[in-house]
Image: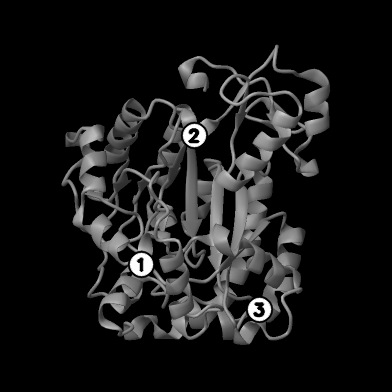
Amino acid sequence: MKRNSINIAGYVDIDRSLWNRQIGGVSVISPERFFDNYNPSNSFVLTASVDKKNAQIAEVLERNGWRKNESFSDIQKFNPFFPTVEITGICNLRCSSCIRSDKNIIGNGKYMSFEDYKKVIDKLIYDIPFLYLVDLYIWGEPILNKDLPKIIEYNKSLGVASGLSTNLNKIDNLPGVMAARPAQLRVSVSGMSSETYDLTHTGGKWTKVEQNLKVLRELRSRYNEQTNVEFYFHIYKHNIHEIESAKSLCREYGFRFHPSLAILFHDFVLDYRKTGMLNPNAKAAADLMVLDIDTLIDDCDEYSDKNCILTRIIPTINWDLSVMPCCTYTPSLIHSNYLACDFEELMHLRTNSRQCSDCQDHSLHRWNDQMRYSTLVTEIASGSAGPDVASV
């Protein structure tokens, strides 16, 4: 907004821990304080959350006299796109749910240099003037890239938040990354012990992660807790009993607990739909999923008439500057160089790509719709799902 000469008066949030804090020099206030001091005649509101919560916020505003598109709007009207840039074409793990577990599907690439990234983000801002967030990962481990601190700093200078995801097994570059104060760092975990974590985060070691979480906590504290650390817990049948330990750790460390149903990557599922055979590399994860693959596919078929849940994630840019149609399938390129392609042309190429058609023909544009299972996840995480949930 500031980049486009629009000043933010304040943030409104129901999270009490944020009240009276400042984010980027802007205060966070409660909804009650907001309604006491602002009205449709003196301000304009942008709702800035996921679709379901945006709709809930809109209902509250409308009950208090605000009118959509006149006194409030969804921030996605300004910025409907969410690019993702693979700055690291390498991963140090081979998780069984991920295509990295099969080198025949995807091998290691290289790192995107800061110089190339600078060209990419400059063009992204030209293509998407109200761009505010870029995820810096797809299938790679971003903190392996030694240029990541410079990338984060440059993003900040442009008013762009950096989204990261890490398995936190190798943290040589983590001090520099945290010193750059990224907006969000997601830590991907699938257990709280060697018996659970090491089974599904293949090649990873819980003993390392456990120690590295302490380092992360210390670094976050050192830099005034400006990075939102999300503890992304993949729920499998074998780790449900450890959810309370995960929640306890998050309370102690000040991390945000984010439970999610464990899922297989699209490539595995598309191949399964076509052949009826599951890639053996994915079997360990598939056998442990709370909802089996056939149930999840049936759910996709039920909602096949709805739009793709990833429509807004464009462009998807690989470490070598090539552009892919989707952030969940292995490279089937729609262009060899993002820097040499018009944005409107990219959208056309993506919409009409063979990958998109193939995916939608098999209803997998609705795969991994985590919002659909949010109630189940909440019940499991709260312990109210019942004793038989692990055998669903």
Q: Which of marks 1 and 2 is nearer the N terminus?
A: 2
Look at the picture and state if 134 lies above or below 98: above
Towards the viewer: 292 or 96: 292
Q: Are marks 3 and 1 in contact (CB under 8 Å)?
A: no
Q: How far apart are marks 1 and 2 (CA)?
A: 26 Å
In the image, residue 123 lies at what x, y percent? 29, 30
In the image, residue 169 lies at what x, y percent? 49, 68
Q: Residues within 10 Å of mark 3 (few under 14, many from 20)?
A: some
Look at the picture and state if 185 lies above or below 210: above
Label 3 sits on a secondary structure element that is helix
Q: How far apart are marks 3 and 1 (CA)?
A: 24 Å
The residue pinned by badge 2 equals: 76
Q: What residue type is labelled 3?
A: Ile
Residue at the spot 53% in from the left edge and 31% down from the top edge:
75
The residue pinned by badge 1 equals: 266
Q: In this view, does 66 lie to the left or right of 126?
A: right
Q: How crowded is mark 1: few (under 14 residues within 10 Å), some or many (20 or more)?
A: many
Look at the picture and state if 117 lies above or below 330: above
In the rendered image, is residue 76 in sight? Answer: yes
Residue at the spot 56% in from the left edge and 41% down from the top edge:
181
Q: Is residue 161 left or right of residue 123?
A: right
Residue at the spot 35% in from the left edge and 82% down from the top edge:
281
The residue pinned by badge 3 equals: 240
Look at the picture and state if 105 lies above or below 64: below
Q: Is residue 262 left or right of residue 99?
A: right
Q: What residue type is labelled 2?
A: Gln
Q: Residues within 10 Å of mark 2 (few under 14, many from 20)?
A: some
**Residue found at the very far top of the displayed protein:** 41
> Closer to us: mark 2 or mark 3?
2
In the rendered image, is residue 321 in sight? Answer: no
Q: Which of marks 2 and 3 is nearer the N terminus?
A: 2
